[in-house]
Image: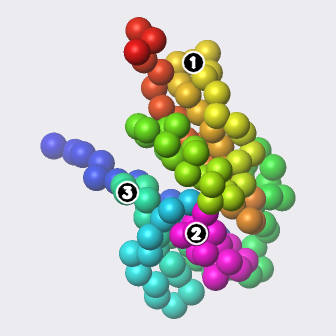
Amino acid sequence: MFAVKAAQHVLAVKDLEKTESYFLDKLGFSVRFRVDGWSFVSLGGFHVMLGHCPDELPASDTHEHSYFAYVNCEGINEIYCDYQLRGAEIFQAISDKPWGLREFGVATPEGHRIMFGEDIDPSGN
């Protein structure tokens, strides 16, 4: 039977060291391994491959296309507070959405954007 174990996203970045540091220091990721211009980082089951691509268009220049991941999670209030304390760039404050999710968004120094969302308990508990 088919099953997805995890998702791994690939990002082209101009400054690998700065971007990796942001993921580690501001977003709480850990390094899985590094190899020849690549850094493989993870936050639980959320995996990102950062590739050094100095000649690529920066994500910030793609505007709305700079979103690369939506992370469905639990404990969203805790991670939001943690990211505030760490100084992560929060481009969308946490709020309850009419589509049944509590969401917020962060951006990397090069403009890649990640949304975090948690299902809202319809009972209000």
| Among the two numbered marks 3 and 2 on one chain, the one whose residue lies closer to the N terminus | 2
Instruction: Tell me what residue is drawn at x 45 percent, y 12 percent.
Output: 124
Res. 123 mark = none
Q: Magenta part of the protein: which range?
A: 13-26
Q: Name the element at disc 2.
A: helix
In the image, 72 versus 58, the foreground residue is 72
Badge 3 is on which residue?
44
68 versus 16 height, above or below: above
| Among the two numbered marks 1 and 3 on one chain, the one whose residue lies closer to the N terminus | 3
Quarter assignment of residue 27: bottom right
> Where does residue 55 sit, x and y in percent of width and height?
77, 80
Question: In the rendered view, does 32 fall on the left or right side of 97?
Answer: left
- Furthest residue in direction right, as rendered: 61
Quarter assignment of residue 60: bottom right
Q: Nearer the viewer, mark 3 or mark 2?
A: 2
> Where does residue 95 sit, x and y in percent of width and height?
64, 27
Q: Name the element at disc 1.
A: loop
Taking the magenta stretch, the answer to whether it contains residue 23 is yes
Badge 2 is on which residue?
25
Taking the magenta stretch, the answer to whether it contains residue 57 is no
> Where does residue 77 sit, x and y in percent of width and height?
52, 37
Neighbour tally class for label 3: few under 14, some 14-19, many 20 plus, Cα within 10 Å: few
**Do we see residue 56 in this rendering?**
yes
